[in-house]
Image: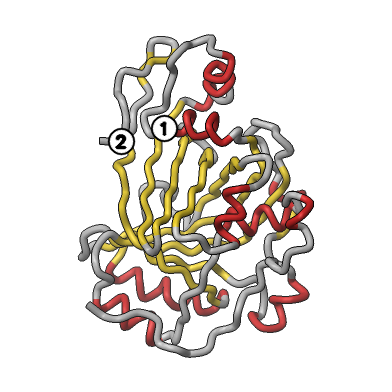
Amino acid sequence: MIGRSQNVIDGQALKINRALLIRTETKFLVAEATARAISERLAVLCERDEHTPAGARDYASHSLYFDSPTRSLYRAKVLELQRQLKLRVRYYDDGPVWLEVKRKDGELITKSGCPLDRARWPRVLQDYFTEKIPGLLAPNGFLDMIQQLGGEPVCRVHYRREAWVSLVDDDLRITFDRDLRAEPAWGDLSLSMDPSSAALMDNPWDTHSAWGGSPVIMEIKTSKPVPAWMAALVDAFRLTPQGISKFAMGVEASDIRSPDLRTANTPWRPVPPTGAPALKAV
């Protein structure tokens, strides 16, 4: 359905073992105290996701984002086009890297990931571009799209993720992302990043007075209608959905927009809560 399965590198097939996800994603900016209060309630009906180490609250997540030389994917986001695309290499502190393709069509998100042994990056990309291995593809089309786009690494994004999975609902995931940082990649395919030297993706002068510190990005992800208990929790804390893109924030924080966009009025500025109802219970 999403690609061929006979693609081999060094005798090993690249396969998609992360299912094609079709879902909606609703994002909120919340204060740290609010995030902790919501987490306490989630603990009753949810469990930590599979990436969370035993006894830990969160884990590090890193992404290397690609875009065209003219930043066409970034433009699509900031111009709020109907159809948007993100191409990234997602990786954690250990385990494989994931070649991810994420599409947005209106409110619908489609995401697929192809796992790759970390030692084989970036050689897989270099081999594909130099045709040392003719016809090489990642089954989700990642390498094809990089080539068609003329894509290059533009920024690395790091954050700490607290992730919950519902025990009582089919496909409901809630995440809290903290300490978002970014650095320019300048075409470098390396996965190495020192979060302590990277730029914070929110400006404390703008956010700390309204939020009492850096805001937390809370996200509800589901392929089903949002359950009534989750919608009630959102309303109880008077949360308001906001359009937030870590990719766009990373480009802006790294100041790597193409020259004609660097003066555009598109900086990320979190909006304090208004108390408007956020989700309709189903």
- Which one is nearer the viewer's eye here, 35 or 99? 99
- Which one is nearer the viewer's eye here, 87 or 163? 87
- Res. 159 visible in picture: no
- Which one is nearer the viewer's eye here, 218 or 256? 256
Q: Are marks 1 and 2 in contact (CB under 8 Å)?
A: yes
Q: Which secondary structure lies at badge 2?
A: loop
| Residue 82, quarter of picture | bottom left
Q: Residue at x 60, y 48 (%)?
A: 72
Image quadrant in which the N terminus is located:
top left
Q: Residue at x 57, y 45 (%)?
A: 62
Residue 46 appears at what percent x and percent y?
A: 30, 64
Residue 196 appears at what percent x and percent y?
A: 73, 50
| Residue 272, quarter of picture | bottom right
- Res. 74 visible in picture: yes
Q: Residue at x 51, y 42 (%)?
A: 87
Disc 1 marks which residue? 141
Q: Residue at x 76, y 53 (%)?
A: 255
Q: Is residue 103 left or right of residue 127?
A: left
The amino acid type found where label 1 is placed reads Gly
| Residue 37, quarter of picture | bottom left
Q: Which secondary structure lies at badge 1?
A: loop
Disc 2 marks which residue? 2
Label 1: how many Cα within 10 Å (few below 14, some 14–19, many 20+): some
Q: In this view, does 185 lie to the left or right of 144?
A: right
